[in-house]
Amino acid sequence: MRCKVGVCPLDMAIITYQPNFAGNTIYGVCFIILLFMQLFFGIRKKTWTYMTAVCLGIFGEIVGYGGRLMLNNNPFDMNNFLIYLVPLTVAPALLTGGIYLCLSRVIVTVGADYSRIKPKMYTYIFIGCDLLSLILQSIGGAIASMANTTSSRDLGVHIMIAGLISQIISMIIFFALWGDFALRVRKAKSTGNLTGQAPLYESLRADPSFRWFQWTLFVATLLIFIRSVYRVAELWDGFQSHLANDEVTFMIFEGPLIIIALMMMTAFHPGRIFDDLWIPAGKGYRFFKHGDTGPTDKIELIERNY
């Protein structure tokens, strides 16, 4: 006999509760709205790489909450569980990829001389770390999905945890470098020695929205970090642990943190903040050629070795 709700007790299910239909539907709808908004701004402002990373992450969230709705109908089905588990575990790594693209441009704008590493290296290093995390989580998810035994399934979960831990470690290093950069800029500003700023971004630096953008970027990153720590704790003792079966904790630390982070990343979308300077900042451009002050899409720019 195949287990289903009303036939077998819930303590025989993969998770020992039926995910709340209304709550998970609300989260799913929020992500769908955020996806369309990110697509709108991404296409309009031509932030293609950022849009791709963030939208793939949001799509993963949508699929994951779809899996939870399927679990509401049948919490005994392993496929339903994996449709929920794998996308929701992997998706935030794609969102941080978008954040890394933003910070490299912030550093070019504020003053690359105050960064310990070249701005482009933030993208290369930390997106590389994200890819490692994604590969580990994907391999773990694949092993768990194909497992026929508890030991094989546990192996898959452990590999997923390793991927999450690698993501957390890379985010800690990212925070350290970002904090060091911010402190060095602050110190230079307080002593009146803030030099070497790219003239191309003078108006952007003076715009209050750029300052807010940096704060929202920091808060969004922090929220994703907190969620990742929670996810490791949730999976650490396996699917049958108390935390893995505590829906209230899940509904607080999973969906809302990512939704709030994405709301900030949408309200202060980098395409809206940087506008025509998004591409030049990504390439490390600093100057207008020959003092030209025309629109950035109609002038030739000089690139510094970033």
Image: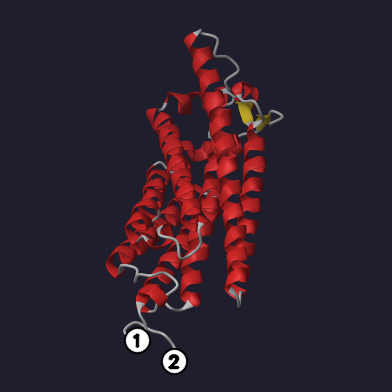
Q: Is residue 217 above or below residue 89?
A: above
Q: Is residue 29 above or below residue 297?
A: below
Task: Give the residue at mark 1.
Answer: 7
Res. 207 visible in picture = yes
Helix, strand or loop under label 1: loop
Q: Residue at (30%, 67%) from the top-left corner?
A: 20
Q: Position of residue 196 (x, y in %)?
A: 60, 17
Q: Position of residue 18 (x, y in %)?
A: 34, 71
Q: Is residue 257 above or below residue 25?
A: above
Helix, strand or loop under label 2: loop
Q: Residue at (55%, 40%) from the top-left corner?
A: 171
Task: Say left or right for 104 vs 246.
Answer: right
Task: Give the residue at mark 2.
Answer: 1
> Which image quadrant for residue 286?
top right
For the residue pair 30 and 81, the one nearer the viewer reads as 81
Pointers 2 and 1 in contact (CB under 8 A)? yes
Quadrant of the rendering where the N terminus is positioned: bottom left
Q: Residue furthest right?
A: 305
